[in-house]
Image (spheres, rainbow, N blue to C red):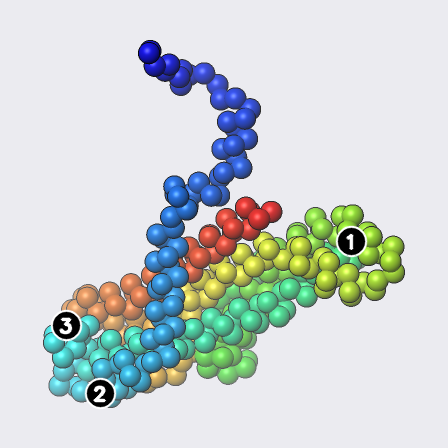
Amino acid sequence: MAHVVEDESRPASAWQVATARDAGPAAREGRGGRRPGLVLAMGWIVLLTVVAILAPLVAPYDPIKQDLGSAVAGSSAQHLLGTDEFGRDVLSRLIWGIRPALLGVLVAIATASAIGLPWGLVAGYAGGKADLVLMRVADALLVLPGLVIALAITTALGANLTNAMLAVGIVFSPIVARVLRSGVLTVRDREYVMVTRLYGLPPRHRMLHHVLPNAVAPALVQITLLAGISFLVQAALGFLGIGVEPPSPSWGDSLSGAYKFISVAPAMTFAPGVTIVLTVLSVYRIGDALRDRLEITA
């Protein structure tokens, strides 16, 4: 029996186009639903969390104990990742640095959500002058350099980890507000919301129980992506000496110390740099998977 060969130059049918469009997010995950990238990303975040909890048991040395005789030493059996300029074990400082890294991101994301979600919900649902004023405030904050605002707020509140990441969360809040407002605008006039008005439900009930649950998905994806940026911002602040106070370990401080000796021992920058990059990429991968899942659900 002769085999029929399809003409690849023939334009795709409407059914083929629709099938390819509907399968878009799922197709990006690979055949059979395999998601090796997502599994690795989640595994890395889980590993960081477990190591942070078990830091006293896992870290081989005291992260702040100095040994000037072993300063800037390379990898060895005693110090797998070498030592820093004060002879402190790099691996131990990376392990103990996970705690402030995770805590700082949680503070930033919680602050951004606590401010940005009500902000965007009220602006999108109320509309009119309230929406105009609230969004102009958001535009004004977004125009200003975020790092400069964070530094100014940190200087006013005091230079420590909590205040620094609180400032980062305030900077992120208008981003969350704008994304949620867009979702609210697409939901507030739908039939099921109009029915709640006919039943005489108060606006607060409608916003919290009918509008917000159906409009929050894009904001959740944005918050996940902001978590990745929070790791970078926290590392940048630590690099500048803002946040975790020395000699307490932090990834940014480890990178800053290694940078001073980059011409003598460039390998010192690898451990904190790779750790930060892997963490940020993992958070972004999780956010990408969340977006695809919400697209499929929608």
Q: How busy is the neighbourhood of tag 1: few (under 14 within 10 Å), some, or many (20 plus)?
A: some
Mark 2 vs 3, N-terminal side: 2
The residue at 43%/43% (across/down) is 28
63 sits left or right of 53 in the view: left
Residue 17 versus residue 285 in the image, above or below: above
98 sits left or right of 203 in the view: left
Mark 2 vs 1, N-terminal side: 2
Taking depth in this image into account, of 165 and 29 the one nearest to the observer is 29
Residue for badge 3: 75
x, y percent for residue 275: 31, 66
Residue 179 versus residue 44 in the image, above or below: above
Amino acid type, residue under disc 2 in the picture: Gln
Mark 1 vs 3, N-terminal side: 3
x, y percent for residue 175: 58, 59
x, y percent for residue 166: 53, 75
Residue for badge 2: 66
x, y percent for residue 90: 24, 76
Q: Which is more foreground, mark 1 or mark 3?
A: 1
Amino acid type, residue under disc 1 in the picture: Val
Residue for badge 1: 193
The residue at 58%/54% (across/down) is 218
Q: Is mark 2 on a helix, strand or loop?
A: loop
